[in-house]
Amino acid sequence: MKNAKIPVLGFVAASGTGKTTLLTQLIPLLKQMGLRIGLIKHSHHDFEIDQPGKDSYRLREAGATSVMLVSQYRRAIINELTLDKELRLVDQLTHLNQAELDLILVEGFRSEIFPKIEIYRKLLDAPLLYPDDSDIIAIATDDPLQTPFHLTQLNLNEPQMIATFIQKFISDSHD
Protein backbone atom coordinates (compact mmCIF):
# COMPACT_ATOMS: atom_id res chain seq x y z
CA MET A 1 0.00 0.00 0.00
CA LYS A 2 1.31 3.41 -0.97
CA ASN A 3 2.57 5.47 2.01
CA ALA A 4 2.93 2.32 4.15
CA LYS A 5 6.52 1.76 5.24
CA ILE A 6 5.51 -1.04 7.63
CA PRO A 7 2.80 -3.72 7.60
CA VAL A 8 -0.81 -2.49 7.76
CA LEU A 9 -3.60 -4.83 8.85
CA GLY A 10 -7.28 -3.98 9.03
CA PHE A 11 -10.19 -5.27 11.07
CA VAL A 12 -13.56 -5.12 9.37
CA ALA A 13 -17.04 -6.23 10.37
CA ALA A 14 -20.60 -5.11 10.67
CA SER A 15 -21.19 -2.43 13.27
CA GLY A 16 -21.55 -3.84 16.77
CA THR A 17 -19.53 -6.99 16.05
CA GLY A 18 -16.74 -6.12 18.50
CA LYS A 19 -13.86 -4.71 16.44
CA THR A 20 -12.75 -2.31 19.17
CA THR A 21 -13.19 -4.93 21.89
CA LEU A 22 -10.97 -7.37 20.00
CA LEU A 23 -8.35 -4.70 19.32
CA THR A 24 -8.21 -3.77 23.01
CA GLN A 25 -7.44 -7.43 23.73
CA LEU A 26 -4.89 -7.80 20.92
CA ILE A 27 -2.82 -4.66 21.46
CA PRO A 28 -1.46 -5.70 24.89
CA LEU A 29 -0.65 -9.18 23.55
CA LEU A 30 1.19 -7.71 20.56
CA LYS A 31 3.07 -5.32 22.85
CA GLN A 32 4.13 -8.31 24.98
CA MET A 33 5.60 -9.76 21.77
CA GLY A 34 7.75 -6.64 21.53
CA LEU A 35 5.74 -4.92 18.79
CA ARG A 36 5.15 -1.19 18.63
CA ILE A 37 1.58 -0.66 17.46
CA GLY A 38 -0.03 2.28 15.72
CA LEU A 39 -3.77 2.41 15.19
CA ILE A 40 -6.05 4.26 12.80
CA LYS A 41 -9.77 4.14 13.57
CA HIS A 42 -12.20 5.37 10.95
CA SER A 43 -15.40 7.02 12.12
CA HIS A 44 -18.37 7.95 10.01
CA HIS A 45 -19.51 10.39 12.68
CA ASP A 46 -18.38 13.81 13.81
CA PHE A 47 -16.47 13.54 17.07
CA GLU A 48 -14.78 15.71 19.66
CA ILE A 49 -11.39 14.69 20.96
CA ASP A 50 -11.32 17.83 23.04
CA GLN A 51 -13.58 18.67 25.96
CA PRO A 52 -15.59 21.88 26.25
CA GLY A 53 -14.01 24.24 28.74
CA LYS A 54 -10.44 22.98 28.20
CA ASP A 55 -7.91 25.49 26.85
CA SER A 56 -7.22 23.52 23.66
CA TYR A 57 -10.96 23.28 22.93
CA ARG A 58 -11.40 27.01 23.49
CA LEU A 59 -8.46 27.82 21.20
CA ARG A 60 -9.83 25.61 18.42
CA GLU A 61 -13.31 27.09 18.85
CA ALA A 62 -11.71 30.53 18.57
CA GLY A 63 -10.68 29.62 15.04
CA ALA A 64 -7.36 27.76 15.08
CA THR A 65 -7.35 25.28 12.18
CA SER A 66 -4.74 23.08 13.89
CA VAL A 67 -4.09 22.68 17.60
CA MET A 68 -1.20 20.67 19.03
CA LEU A 69 -1.42 19.74 22.69
CA VAL A 70 1.87 18.37 24.07
CA SER A 71 3.27 17.13 27.35
CA GLN A 72 6.22 14.92 28.23
CA TYR A 73 3.82 11.96 28.01
CA ARG A 74 1.95 12.41 24.73
CA ARG A 75 1.11 14.64 21.79
CA ALA A 76 -2.27 15.24 20.21
CA ILE A 77 -2.81 17.17 17.02
CA ILE A 78 -6.32 18.26 16.17
CA ASN A 79 -6.85 19.39 12.59
CA GLU A 80 -10.15 20.77 11.40
CA LEU A 81 -11.06 19.13 8.09
CA THR A 82 -13.40 20.60 5.51
CA LEU A 83 -13.53 17.75 3.04
CA ASP A 84 -16.56 17.05 0.90
CA LYS A 85 -15.43 13.48 0.22
CA GLU A 86 -14.64 10.41 2.30
CA LEU A 87 -11.15 10.13 3.75
CA ARG A 88 -8.69 7.63 2.24
CA LEU A 89 -6.52 5.38 4.39
CA VAL A 90 -3.51 5.89 2.14
CA ASP A 91 -3.59 9.62 2.96
CA GLN A 92 -3.95 9.04 6.70
CA LEU A 93 -0.83 6.85 6.81
CA THR A 94 1.34 9.90 6.17
CA HIS A 95 0.26 11.35 9.54
CA LEU A 96 1.80 8.53 11.62
CA ASN A 97 5.48 8.40 12.51
CA GLN A 98 5.99 4.92 11.08
CA ALA A 99 9.69 4.90 12.02
CA GLU A 100 8.60 4.33 15.63
CA LEU A 101 6.16 1.51 14.79
CA ASP A 102 6.26 -2.14 13.70
CA LEU A 103 2.60 -2.48 12.69
CA ILE A 104 -0.38 -0.28 11.94
CA LEU A 105 -3.75 -1.73 12.86
CA VAL A 106 -6.77 -0.21 11.17
CA GLU A 107 -10.36 -0.33 12.31
CA GLY A 108 -12.64 0.39 9.40
CA PHE A 109 -11.81 1.63 5.90
CA ARG A 110 -13.30 -1.66 4.73
CA SER A 111 -13.68 -0.61 1.08
CA GLU A 112 -9.95 0.17 0.76
CA ILE A 113 -7.41 -2.24 -0.70
CA PHE A 114 -5.15 -3.64 2.05
CA PRO A 115 -4.95 -6.88 4.10
CA LYS A 116 -7.83 -7.34 6.55
CA ILE A 117 -9.20 -9.71 9.14
CA GLU A 118 -12.97 -10.02 9.13
CA ILE A 119 -14.72 -10.42 12.47
CA TYR A 120 -17.90 -12.47 12.37
CA ARG A 121 -20.38 -13.32 15.13
CA LYS A 122 -23.00 -15.86 14.16
CA LEU A 123 -25.56 -14.39 16.59
CA LEU A 124 -25.62 -11.07 14.68
CA ASP A 125 -26.42 -12.86 11.40
CA ALA A 126 -24.81 -10.07 9.35
CA PRO A 127 -23.69 -10.89 5.80
CA LEU A 128 -20.12 -12.10 5.50
CA LEU A 129 -17.74 -9.64 3.85
CA TYR A 130 -15.03 -11.98 2.56
CA PRO A 131 -16.92 -13.22 -0.52
CA ASP A 132 -16.83 -9.67 -1.92
CA ASP A 133 -13.43 -8.61 -0.58
CA SER A 134 -10.35 -10.46 -1.80
CA ASP A 135 -8.18 -8.48 0.67
CA ILE A 136 -9.62 -10.38 3.63
CA ILE A 137 -6.86 -12.82 4.62
CA ALA A 138 -8.52 -14.33 7.70
CA ILE A 139 -11.82 -14.49 9.51
CA ALA A 140 -12.08 -14.40 13.29
CA THR A 141 -15.35 -16.07 14.18
CA ASP A 142 -17.12 -17.40 17.25
CA ASP A 143 -18.54 -20.31 15.25
CA PRO A 144 -16.66 -22.38 12.62
CA LEU A 145 -17.66 -21.55 9.05
CA GLN A 146 -17.38 -23.24 5.67
CA THR A 147 -14.83 -20.99 3.99
CA PRO A 148 -12.39 -21.28 1.08
CA PHE A 149 -9.12 -23.07 1.91
CA HIS A 150 -7.05 -19.90 1.41
CA LEU A 151 -8.94 -18.03 4.13
CA THR A 152 -7.48 -18.64 7.59
CA GLN A 153 -10.09 -19.16 10.31
CA LEU A 154 -9.29 -17.86 13.77
CA ASN A 155 -11.21 -18.37 16.99
CA LEU A 156 -12.62 -14.99 17.98
CA ASN A 157 -12.59 -16.08 21.63
CA GLU A 158 -8.83 -16.80 21.56
CA PRO A 159 -7.04 -13.45 21.18
CA GLN A 160 -3.64 -15.14 21.67
CA MET A 161 -4.29 -17.22 18.52
CA ILE A 162 -5.11 -14.07 16.58
CA ALA A 163 -2.02 -12.27 17.95
CA THR A 164 0.16 -15.20 16.84
CA PHE A 165 -1.42 -15.00 13.35
CA ILE A 166 -0.64 -11.26 13.26
CA GLN A 167 2.96 -11.89 14.33
CA LYS A 168 3.32 -14.36 11.44
CA PHE A 169 1.66 -11.82 9.09
CA ILE A 170 4.32 -9.25 10.05
CA SER A 171 7.11 -11.80 9.59
CA ASP A 172 5.76 -12.80 6.16
CA SER A 173 5.50 -9.11 5.19
CA HIS A 174 9.24 -8.72 5.64
CA ASP A 175 10.07 -11.69 3.36
Image (tube, rainbow, N blue to C red):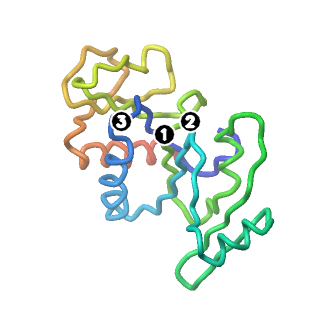
The reply to whether residue 112 is visible in this rendering is yes
Q: Disc 2 on helix, strand or loop?
A: loop
Q: Nearer the viewer, residue 71 or 33?
A: 71
Label 1 crowd bin: few (<14), some (14–19), many (20+), radius 10 Å: many
Quadrant housing the N terminus: top right
Q: Amino acid at mark 1?
A: Gly
Query: On the image, numbered disc 3 is attached to which residue?
Result: 16
- Kindly indicate the quadrant of the structure image that contains residue 144: top left
Residue at 71% over, 45% down: 91
For the point 33% across and 52% down, the residue is: 26
Drawn side of residue 149 relative to residue 69, left or right: left
Q: Quick check: marks 1 and 2 in contact, CB under 8 Å?
A: yes
Upstream in the sequence, badge 3 or badge 2?
3
Q: CA distance from mark 1 to mark 2?
A: 8 Å
Q: Is residue 67 above or below residue 171?
A: below
**Few, some or many residues within 10 Å of mark 2 (<14, 14–19, 20+):** many
Q: What is the crowding at mark 3: few (fewer than 14 residues within 10 Å), some, or many (at least 20)?
A: few
**Residue 126 coordinates in the image, percent (x, y):** 34, 20
Q: Secondary structure at mark 3?
A: loop
Q: Which residue matches tag 1?
A: 10
Residue 146 circle label: none
Residue under the point 80% across and 65% down: 63
Residue 101 drawn at (x, y percent): 54, 61
- The residue lying toward the viewer, choosing from 159 and 67, is 67
Instruction: Mark yes or no: residue 175 visible.
Output: no
Q: What residue did someone put label 2 on?
A: 109
What distance separates the C-alpha of mark 3 from that of mark 2?
A: 16 Å
